[in-house]
Image: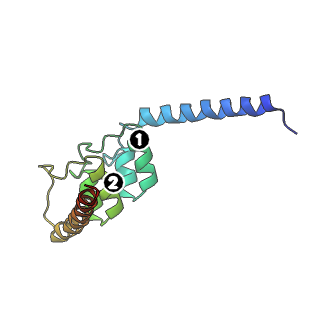
Amino acid sequence: MEKPHFILQLGTIVKKLLNFLFHMVLISMKKKNKNGETAFYTAARNNRKEIAELLISHGADINEKKNKNGETAFYTAARNNRKEIAELLISHGADINEKKIKMEKPHFILQLGTIVKKLLNFLFHMVLISMKKK
């Protein structure tokens, strides 16, 4: 049977290791790969919501100024029909009106419309709930 102080020491070691790993993530969050993508952009592009949320909670810039193709994480999420990621970005203040986004693909606009419709339905539902409480 393990002694309590060993378990406490192990907890301290794990905590220090996690702090080190988060420190490394913070250092690496601004670095870009050969495609001009940050770790956050890559997580959003690959529909890795949990990782995107973790990076946001540690200060990732959700409005990072684009990859080498001029796409923001929000543009890429909407273009690839990554609704959960797009909604996550909107909920954290993503700039959906970025002026340099090229909206040349009609399906992008349709997909964005679906996301906006869901967001408006959600907001309408919240207004109804708040009105009932009065």
At which x and y percent is residue 120?
21, 63
Q: Residue at x 34, y 49 (%)?
A: 41
Q: Is residue 121 left or right of residue 9?
A: left
Q: Quadrant of the C terminus?
A: bottom left
Mark 1 Cα within 10 Å, few/some/many (few <14, many 20+)?
few
Residue type (three-letter) at the residue carrying disc 1: Ser
Residue 105 position (above or below residue 98): below
Q: As rendered, which of 33 and 50 lies closer to the eye?
A: 50
The disc placed on residue 4 is none
Q: Could you tell me if the residues under marks 1 and 2 are in contact, i.e. CB atoms within 8 Å?
A: no
Helix, strand or loop for disc 1? helix
Residue 67 position (above or below residue 21): below
Residue type (three-letter) at the residue carrying disc 2: Leu
Tell which circle, 1 or 2, labels the residue nearer the N-terminal end: 1
Helix, strand or loop for disc 2? helix
Where is mark 1, residue-wise?
57
At which x and y percent is residue 15?
61, 33
Mark 2 Cα within 10 Å, few/some/many (few <14, many 20+)?
some
At which x and y percent is residue 54?
44, 45
- Tally of marks: 2
Q: Residue at x 45, y 50 (%)?
A: 51
Q: Quadrant of the N terminus?
A: top right
Where is mark 2, residue-wise?
88
Q: Residue at x 23, y 52 (%)?
A: 71
Mark 1–mark 2 distance (CA, rounded to whole Å)? 12 Å
